[in-house]
Amino acid sequence: MTAQAPYPVGTPGAPWGAAERAAWLSRQTRQRSYQAEVLDAIERLRPRFQLVEYGRLHYGPDSYPLLAIRSRDWNDELPVALVTGGVHGYETSGVHGALRFVDQHAAGYAGRVNLLVAPCISPWAYERIHRWNANAIDPNRSFRDDSPAEESAALMRLVAPVRDRVLVHIDLHETTDTDESEFRPALAARDGKPHEPGEIPDGFYVVDDSEHPQPGFQQAVIAAVAMVTHIAPADRNGEIIGSPVVAPGVIEYPLRQLGLCAGITDARYKTTTEVYPDSPRATAEQCNAAQAVAVCAAIDYALAHP
């Protein structure tokens, strides 16, 4: 086996300090536009939905408004469905799948459930196609009190007033080839640990809450998405990304313990979706559609099993 080259920032075995973080930041470049690809798309929804600016990020000269989309006919007597995307900015279909759901499907839930959709939680990372924020912090390990990630803290503030009324929360993600080629090596380098190579699953899967599993709910999402794109099989160890497969396309994490976005409420039904955009068997269109279909399936199941 060919030895892996050291990550280009830092010294192997030594956690990063301020100098290494600055060196890492200097390597990040804007590759796409949050304004053109996300904010403009959200603005086009204004005639049909309420738009809420729930925070603003400031990184150097860059300023990013954080926008959420709410049901215009919000009714405090109804439960809440929370949809989040773009916690990791490079996971493109999480953002555009959430927007697709709102544009094409949300009207069908009017009067049945209140929708709260935060489609792009990490806009700085969206523009740079990155997992972390500008401080080399992973927002999806930072949903906890006194969060070190402003992206995470802002979303938690947005959700706080309705936190106890959320029935279902679906958090839209991707697992990509760059997880193995860039982001996991970067994480190991940042923390001064060795990088342990892994495998990227080919297909869609979901992550249930190991502390409050809902197998029927997860399988409903899997069954719906299987009509759009393929479901990831278990590897030779019966696992997906190192976790045992508990049902086709389903693994479990302790969501709140790990500070993950899907654990920010006490919703009965919660899941993290993962699509594989680098698969030769899937297109960007399929990935966006799979995310939107997953949202519909999650809300439909939750409303049928309140």
Image (spheres, rainbow, N blue to C red):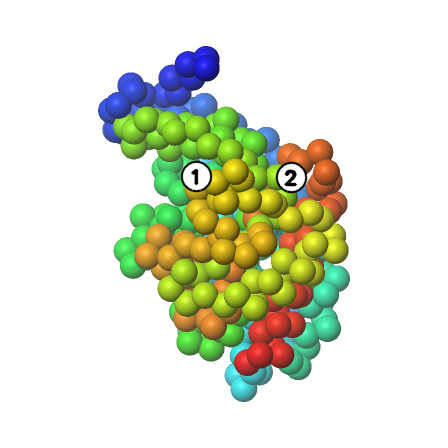
Which numbered disc flags the more N-terminal residue, 2 or 1? 1
- Residue count near mark 2 (Cα–Cα under 10 Å), binned few <14, some 14–19, many ≥20: many
Task: Please identify the quarter of the rendering in which residue 36 is found.
Answer: top right
Residue at the spot 74% in from the left edge and 55% down from the top edge = 227
Direction from residue 100 to residue 85 in the image, left or right:
left
Q: Position of residue 257 (x, y in %)?
A: 33, 57
The amino acid marked with disc number 1 is: Trp
- Please identify the quadrant where the C terminus is shown: bottom right
Residue at the spot 50% in from the left edge and 45% down from the top edge = 238
Q: Secondary structure at mark 2?
A: loop
Q: Which residue is mark 2?
A: 277
Q: Please state which of residues 87 and 206 is positioned toward the viewer in this rendering.
A: 206
The amino acid marked with disc number 2 is: Pro
Task: Please identify the quarter of the rendering in which residue 8 is found.
Answer: top left
Q: Please state which of residues 185 and 264 is positioned toward the viewer in this rendering.
A: 185
Viewer-nearest of discs 2 and 1: 2
Residue at the spot 52% in from the left edge and 65% down from the top edge = 215
Direction from residue 4 to residue 229 in the image, left or right:
right
| Residue 227 in the image: above or below residue 50 | above
Q: Position of residue 178 (x, y in %)?
A: 53, 31
- Residue count near mark 1 (Cα–Cα under 10 Å), binned few <14, some 14–19, many ≥20: many
Q: Secondary structure at mark 1?
A: loop
Q: Position of residue 69 (x, y in %)?
A: 59, 64
Can you name the residue that lies furthest to the bottom here? 77
Residue at the spot 62% in from the left edge and 39% down from the top edge = 202
Task: Please identify the quarter of the rendering in which residue 103 is found.
Answer: bottom right
Residue 132's tag is 1
Direction from residue 15 to residue 130 in the image, left or right:
right
Residue 10's tag is none
